[in-house]
Image (cartoon, rainbow, N blue to C red):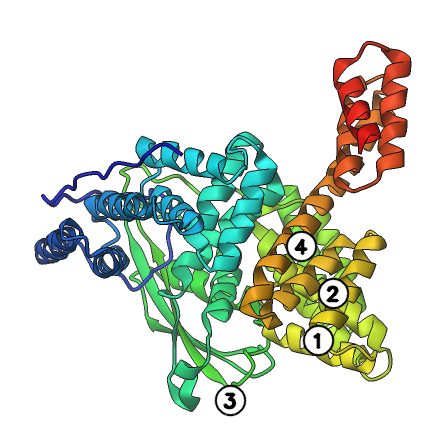
Amino acid sequence: MHKLSTVTFLTIFSLALSFATPAFSQGKKTSTPNAVSEAARINNHATKLVMQGKYDQAIPLYRSLLADYPHYKMGYANLGIALFNKAADLQDKNKDWVVLDLLEEAIFWNPQDKKAVDGLHSQIDSLNLNPKSRTDRLDLAERAKQRGNKRAALTELKAARSIQASKELEKEINELEASLTSEHVLHFSTKDNLQDIDCRPYMENVQNRIRSAWDVPFSERSLSAATIFSVDLNGKIKNIKIDKPSPRKDYNASAIKALNTVEWMRELPLGLKDDIDIQFTFDYNVYSKTPKMPPRPNPADINFAKILNQAKAFYRLKNFKSAIDKYQEALKLDVEDGRTLAENHMSDSYYQLAKQNLSSDAKNAAENFRQCLILAPDYDRAEDGLSSALEKLGVNPKSVTDREKLIDKMVADHNYDFALVDCKSLLKVSNKEEKERFTDKLIQIQRISRSARAKNNWEEFLKKNPNSLEARIAIAQCLIDMNEKPQAIEQLNDVLKQNPHHKQAKDLLDKLNSN
């Protein structure tokens, strides 16, 4: 890796407005002249700390600055610089992964920083990974998640997207971006010592559901409507009312309609024993003189809403299997705006179906809890339910040996999605020494899973283009990643039958035969 050199800072304040689209209120401070002065004061104080080499004091101060004053543009640049300079300071101290983490987050805050981008690419090279490999960047994103740095993970996911975009990747990026703001959006009541329970994943999920259900009315000016509602232990939304209305009745009605469309949340997080009250503010922020009109519903949107309502009706009747079938039918319509809500409600249906079956059919219950966790990886009650199902099947959910045997069997059976669920659970119960090994295992399974999906796509392509050598080479590479050596050799031999001088096929075949 080339040597990182520190960067100087900007200490004169400036203000920039951004976002021309509607945004949810995040409890942020306004951009009044006094606020701008306070933001500049905090910025300059943090900068002085960095100049003194006090990175661990300065970086949290910058983060706090941006949480309270999100329009203070200079704060983003300076936080990026502070993280970069800390990385430069640690470069020669044998802390490769810490340096990587800092550079990834520096780019999150300041994506146009070419020095940070070049430094990150060099750092990735030094770890024997390829910064231009989509697979390696996705693996690095997973490692960042396991370290608990969502911002670093976003940097890697966006890098992977720039190499090759996909709907699945776009969804992951959108969900991660939403989760970074959600803890400032919802304000839980403080009864029953809620502060002792980590509600952040639950809050993220609440925000995502409401966001996906809100039909934003057109407005030429900024509007805000604050709502209050309760959620009972089973996740049912109750007592919806407007707390602080906007001047427009249709805007207030859109907020109420969004909450009624959601209808229920997940069951409350483990540890909560009573209903909770949630305050949610619907903000429409106009920073452009010509805001865009919302698109008109098309036939697919109307059909999607109809099927979604049918699915919700089955759920109310506790016919969870039929509800799941309907949600799957809705998802096939590929209506982007409603996908999040449908997937969230489908995860609830899998959870409830698993609960129904837990006492009579533990194997089926375990499978449905896993299906729920595929859609909702942070659902603590589904995780708890899966543990109960495993115990009934004679598997100790806290035993690393038992869970690892189960994971290996699922991989052998090509059931990669379930294997990933259990591997993530295993990471939660493993000790510090085991965590890195199981992170590697998780990444390996993810690679195999991605290759399996890619193989299926190439096989569909090959059916329509049977003479495509490119497709056969791609399938062979996927099979190699999946440790399916005989099938890979078969594909490569088929390529050489059509073109005996195909260099890539010969090189891959030689490599396989030499191993």
Which numbered disc flags the more N-terminal residue, 4 or 1? 1
Name the mark on residue 404. 2
What secondary structure is marked by label 3? loop
Which sits in the foreground, 274 or 260? Answer: 274
Across and down, in percent, residue 134 comes to 58, 35
Q: Which residue is mark 3?
A: 274
Label 1 and label 2: CA atoms lie apart by 8 Å
What secondary structure is marked by label 2? helix
Q: Which residue is painted at 63% across and 59% down in the image?
A: 438
Q: Amino acid at mark 2?
A: Glu
* Residue 409 shown left or right of residue 439 in the figure: right
Q: Which residue is painted at 52% across and 48% down in the image?
A: 141
Label 3 and label 1: CA atoms lie apart by 32 Å
Vertical side of 269 occupied by 82: above or below: above
Q: Amino acid at mark 4?
A: Lys
What secondary structure is marked by label 1? loop
Q: Which residue is mark 1?
A: 399
Label 4 and label 3: CA atoms lie apart by 39 Å
Label 3 and label 2: CA atoms lie apart by 36 Å
* Residue 193 shown left or right of residue 386 in the figure: left
Quadrant of the rendering where the C terminus is positioned: top right
User: Is residue 314 among what the camera can see?
Assistant: no
Which numbered disc flags the more N-terminal residue, 4 or 2? 2
Q: Which residue is mark 4?
A: 441
